Image (cartoon, rainbow, N blue to C red):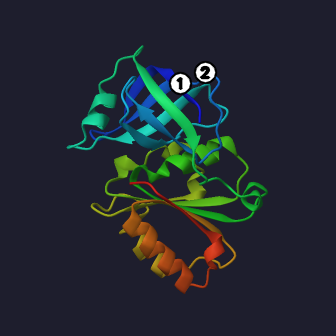
């Protein structure tokens, strides 16, 4: 597994709790949907982050939510350009299947920073036949919304009525059944993935059409 240092180009603040850390690309190759382990150089402890950028970008972006009790995310947020981080990867198999790449209908369901692999999918494969449902607390957490086709993107906000749907993604899915031939990609917290998987199965989707990635 490849492991090398990358230079911090920029830290882009998005909200009081979230940011993008941008690293130089070097010769790093990956499939959209994969993740890496980021470490402080010469330290063994690291964290897993899904790749947010596209395969065509000249840099590597990672979307990070700063955890109040998380020293690692706070460390990343305060890095200066020119600092170095150690990157191991790519890892993981949460990648698009060939049917999806060829235009089969896909539904991508994310909560919070679980939008990261979908952002990489859409930027890397601009011709996909997709719809995205993104569940967040507040509308300012709609990370990368400008990347997605507005007609294919639905924002569910749970704390304030300021998105396209007021409530959790699970509430929306119960009221709006998914066509059974849709290939669904789920990324986010484990509770959401478990509940959404049950909803989709109850609506008649075969389990092989449901792909999941527990993000945190």
Residue hosting label 1: 4
Q: Secondary structure at mark 2?
A: loop
Question: Of residues 43 and 61, which is closer to you in this image?
Answer: 43
Q: Are marks 2 and 1 in contact (CB under 8 Å)?
A: yes
Question: Of residues 79 and 129, which is closer to you in this image?
Answer: 79
Query: What is the quadrant of the N terminus in the image?
Result: top right
- Is 175 drawn above or below residue 149 in the view shown? below
Residue 110 % position (x, y): 47, 59
Q: Secondary structure at mark 1?
A: strand
Residue farthest toward the right in the current orientation of the protein: 102
Question: Horizontally, is 14 left or right of 57 in the view?
Answer: left
Residue farthest toward the left in the current orientation of the protein: 69
Which residue appears at 44% of the width and 72% of the height? 194
* Mark carried by residue 26: 2
Q: How many marks?
A: 2
- Is 130 drawn above or below residue 58 in the view shown? below
Q: Residues within 10 Å of mark 2 (few under 14, many from 20)?
A: few
Residue farthest toward the top in the current orientation of the protein: 82
CA separation in Å, label 2 and label 1: 10 Å
Residue 214 % position (x, y): 45, 59
């Amino acid at each position: 597994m490849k492991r090398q240092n990358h230079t911090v180009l920029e830290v882009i603040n998005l909200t009081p709790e979230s940011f993008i850390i941008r690293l130089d690309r070097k010769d790093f190759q990956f499939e959209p949907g994969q993740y890496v382990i980021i470490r402080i150089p010469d330290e063994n402890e690291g964290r897993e982050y899904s790749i947010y950028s596209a395969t065509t970008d000249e840099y590597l972006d990672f979307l990070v939510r700063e955890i109040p009790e998380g020293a690692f995310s706070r460390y990343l947020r305060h890095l200066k350009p020119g600092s170095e981080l150690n990157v191991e990867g790519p890892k993981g198999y949460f990648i698009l299947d060939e049917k999806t790449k060829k235009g089969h209908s896909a539904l991508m369901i994310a909560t919070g920073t679980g939008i990261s692999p979908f952002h990489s999918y859409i930027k890397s494969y601009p011709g996909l036949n997709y719809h995205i449902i993104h569940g967040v607390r507040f509308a300012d957490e709609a990370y990368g919304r400008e990347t997605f086709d507005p007609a294919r993107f639905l924002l569910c906000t749970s704390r304030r009525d300021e998105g396209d749907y007021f409530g959790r993604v699970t509430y929306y899915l119960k009221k709006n059944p998914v066509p059974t031939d849709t290939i669904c990609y789920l990324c986010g917290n484990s509770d959401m993935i478990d509940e959404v998987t049950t909803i989709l199965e109850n609506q008649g989707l075969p389990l092989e059409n449901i792909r999941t990635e527990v993000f945190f």
